[in-house]
Image (tube, rainbow, N blue to C red):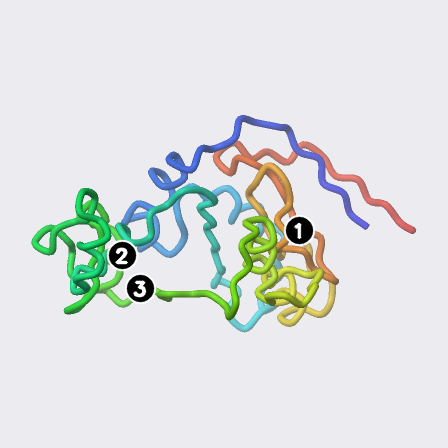
């Protein structure tokens, strides 16, 4: 088993991640700018041809908090939206229209540009039958992708196991103060640290059973 040792740095706030990593130019370049050092660390020891498309990296950004989904992707074509939100609804003439029913929040210029360029997609109305009222249980279902089944591995971890049944160093990188259930894998040990802009590998220990 390989254990990585890292220096601990201040955490990024959600606002800072949005500011640095989700700017239009950052994503349209392929990978958010804030992950530049992470990508360098991951690819430094790679061998060409390991994967069919080694340059492709799946980046999952989880904004764990109070995002207002209805005012992010606005259902401006639905009268119920305005009836239920008389004070905070965004008027139809201000949204950045996706189609005749939905539109982006006025400030999401980058998302609109990426969507029009075919580089951004929305999965709307995700959920499961008979939703549970426990926030913590629901987060577990979100991270495993398997509601009400007692799944122990995360959906990202299972995907990594499928793509690479053999151990592959740094295949999963989890930028957080602690490891997410989503990246729990049967085969791979996720690389976990809390601030990609200050990422620094200061040592490595090799441990054998």
Left or right of residue 190, residue 54 in this image: left
Please say if the residues under marks 2 and 3 sit with CB atoms less than 8 Å apart.
no
Q: Position of residue 112 (x, y in %)?
A: 22, 57
Sequence-first disc among 2 and 3: 2
Q: Residue farthest to the left?
A: 93
Residue 73 disc label: 2
Q: Quadrant of residue 162?
A: bottom right
Vertical position of residue 176 compared to residue 127: above or below: above
- SS at circle 1: loop
Report crowding for label 3: few under 14, some 14 to 19, many 20 or more residues within 10 A (C-alpha): few
Q: Position of residue 67 (x, y in %)?
A: 37, 45
Residue at the spot x=60%, y=54% of the render? 137
- SS at circle 2: strand
Left or right of residue 55, residue 20 in this image: left
Residue 119 disc label: 3
Report crowding for label 2: few under 14, some 14 to 19, many 20 or more residues within 10 A (C-alpha): many
Looking at the rendered image, the disc whose residue lies closer to the viewer, 1 or 2, is: 2
Is 138 or 95 nearer to us in this picture?
138
């Amino acid at each position: 088993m390989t254990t990585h040792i890292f220096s601990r740095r201040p955490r990024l706030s959600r606002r800072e991640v949005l500011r640095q990593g989700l700017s239009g130019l950052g994503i349209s370049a392929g990978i958010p700018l804030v992950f530049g050092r992470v990508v360098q660390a991951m690819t430094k020891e790679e061998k060409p041809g390991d994967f069919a498309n080694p340059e492709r990296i799946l980046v999952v950004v989880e904004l764990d908090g109070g995002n207002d989904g209805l005012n992010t992707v606005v259902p401006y074509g639905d009268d119920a939206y305005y009836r239920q939100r008389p004070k905070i609804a965004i008027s139809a003439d201000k949204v950045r229209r996706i189609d005749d029913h939905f539109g982006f929040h006025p400030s999401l210029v980058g998302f609109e540009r990426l969507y029009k360029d075919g580089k951004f997609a929305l999965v709307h109305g995700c959920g499961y039958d008979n939703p549970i009222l426990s926030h913590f249980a629901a987060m577990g279902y979100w991270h495993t992708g398997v509601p009400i089944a007692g799944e122990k591995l995360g959906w990202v971890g299972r995907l990594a196991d499928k793509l690479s049944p053999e151990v592959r160093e740094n295949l999963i990188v989890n930028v957080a103060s602690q490891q997410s259930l989503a990246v729990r894998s049967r085969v791979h040990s996720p690389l976990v640290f809390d601030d990609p802009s200050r990422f620094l590998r200061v040592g490595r220990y090799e441990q054998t059973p």
